Image: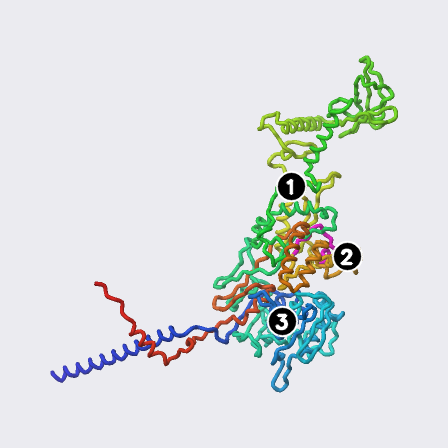
Amino acid sequence: MLERLVAIYVRWEKWALAACAALFLLSLAILLFRFYRANTVLVPATGGTYIEGSVGALLPLNPWFTVTNDVNRDIVSLIFSGLLKYNPRTKKIEEDLATYTVSQDGKTYTVKLKSGIFWQDSTKEYPHPVTADDIVFTYKTVQDPDFPNSLLRQNFRGVTIVLVDSKTVQFKLDQPYSFFPSNLTLGLLPKKSFEKIPVKLLDQTLDFGFKPVGAGPYKIKNIVETELSTEVTLERFSRTIPPDYKLDRIVFRIFPDYQTLLSDLHNLDGIRLVPHTETGKPAVPNRFASNNYTLPQYVALFYNMNRSALSDQKLRLGLQLGTDKQRLVEAIGESEIVDTPLLEINESDWRYHFDPAAAQGALFESEWYFPEKLKLQHLLEQREANKQGILKLAPVLFLDTGAVLNITGSGHDLSGKNRINGVALRSNPASSGSWIVALPTVRGSGSIHIGYNLLKLTDEKGKILDSFYVQRTVTAAEYDRALNEQKLIDRFLASKAGTIPLAQRITVKDFTVDHSRLRLRTKDDPIGFRINSAGKTLTLTLLTSSSPPVYRNVAEQVKKQWAALGVKVIIDIPAARGDFENRLLKRDYDVVLFGQSLLDNLDSYPYWHSSGVQRVTGNRNDLRLDAYNLSQYASFEADSFLETVRSTKDEKERTDALKKLKDVLKRDVPAIFLYSPVYTFAHREDILGMELGHLSLHSDRFLSLDHWYVKQDRIFLPNTGWLNFFSWLSSLFSKESPPKSI
């Protein structure tokens, strides 16, 4: 029995010891875990892949030819690097492959390549360093008259490129241009890859375009066509210059449309541009985070100031004051209202306010009137004229064709030598000392026509002694309308004189024109279109593009709002893009709805300087592709300030010039600036470190790619390691326990 008890005790003791050991190890593990978590931090780690979906088409990848293809621009921005680059955090142009200095006169830019930079086809056996020859080749090729991208060539007009040494190149400008560094962000190309290729055929170099060689942070690995998309895979390219990139691979999947993209959503980490619904909300898929951003762009209504009507500043101002931008952007799902093309200034102190009353006043001063206003004015003038002089008769007559209008009077020394409308007066047989004249209603001398007639009483020499306005009607309905019109004039005049009760008074706003007659307006009556004194209707043709589709909605909103001002708008949307561009070039419009982009330098010069006015001669060969001044706006004042902004290196001088330019544009009203489009970029929430900043192009989101990561490491804090565990443990037990409550 005793032996049995001892055996049980021994087993229990072993179990107890085992439990204590397990408890000790568990406690130690917990303490070690707490120590590790308390003394380490998570940091981005190298590795991983980012896959982005976009809608579009892949074209040859060449930085010379990415102007019209944003999908290509995204890929090109990672394969190629320029001498300089835009920093979306600071909104400044900074160094990339080179450093640069500017001469005191602002006309010479000296760039020097950094050390250890190689092209992506470089190997240990056959190193291919980036040299100054590549710089000269990249930019001098652009200047060649045969270069296929004329728009890019404009950026280097008047620039002399000088090779200084194997790493140094100078760009010498004819005139100071403070925004020139932006031109040096163009991706460099290797001279060796284009040897013996004629300049005019550079846009057809498909071998290079689909196997490009750049000096950017990522190089092409492969391009694969799948059933759903075109897949372009880039892998990290080791460079000696900062920054360091974390992601091993970037994969671009290019789909023909958004629905196809959504069908492969589970394979994507990001979506380049998320479409917006009709209400303006981005259609962001579940489990994706969204980043909304704007670019330095604006959509505006550009007046063609060469058109006679729109050369009137009062008319332009009236249309601007009568455009409700808030309602417009809400209708199309946008939010960023723009009031100036000068996007670098604070516009809060001069925002244009929607003011329909002021708009009506400005349009009236431009001498475009509502038909009822002009009709009322004419009737009042006629009534005032009829009050004076000898002739007295009813202003409205009901005379069938064939009847005769007999006009009688007496005194005033009138005789048969006097005439009314060429018909001689004669003695009135029915009344002694009076006279009478019979005016026919058929063709012939002095006949009374249907409608308005001006009767003229003349002497024997044809001198006009008096005149009288009379209306002839031939139907009972027309006669009643004319009489009612005269009664309304009486009521209007009594209203102005205040001789009738307030409830009966009327103003010009209470009138409308019906069957060429004034009558009282009803709630169902549409607002008429304005006319000028010659009776011409104020009609404006609004040209816009079918792409993006939202432009059609904007145009419809403008048409509706301007109709309330009495302006007839004819919307013109050519079906073919080429037709629209042709109309744009020829300035074949009254108003054009279009968007403009200022890029990173926010330079407004190309769009508002008179040098950008299109010379419309009727000869297509005279039309310039780089004539960006869509309003045909020419102002010596504006030109001067634009030139100062471009040339000065003095920040205060630039700011002062911008303020003065703002006032000139505000006064002249060459366009109505509407809104800046809001874009949405979406990504999975496990893609970390994204910070878009102030983008100037969609592809600029990759300028912060060095901050993106998908993997993380946990590292000890500085001067901390496992050896610090015991001191940390000691600090836990050395802490004083809180005093117990009594």
Image mark for residue 84: 3
Pointer 1: residues within 10 angstroms few (<14), some, or many (20+)? many
Question: In what element is the residue under mark 3?
Answer: strand
Confirm whether residue 23 shows in the render: yes
Query: Nearest the camera: 573 or 47?
Result: 47
Q: Position of residue 266 (x, y in %)?
A: 50, 67
Amino acid type at image mark 3: Leu
Name the residue carrying label 1: 360
Q: Earlier in the sequence, mark 1 or mark 3?
A: 3
Q: Give amino acid for label 2.
A: Arg
Give the vertical position of 449 relative to 166 (above or below).
above
Real-space Cα separation, disc 3 to disc 2, in angstroms: 35 Å
Q: Quadrant of the C terminus?
A: bottom left
Q: Nearer the viewer, residue 511 or 501?
A: 501
Decide: few, some or many residues near mark 2? Use Cα within 10 Å; few <14, some 14-19, many ≥20.
Answer: some
User: Percent from the top left, x then y, of residue 109?
Assistant: 67, 71
For residue 615, the mark is: 2
The magenta span reads 580-594
Above/below status of 452 relative to 662: above
- Which quadrant would residue 356 be assigned to in this image? top right
Q: State if disc 1 and disc 2 touch (CB < 8 Å).
A: no
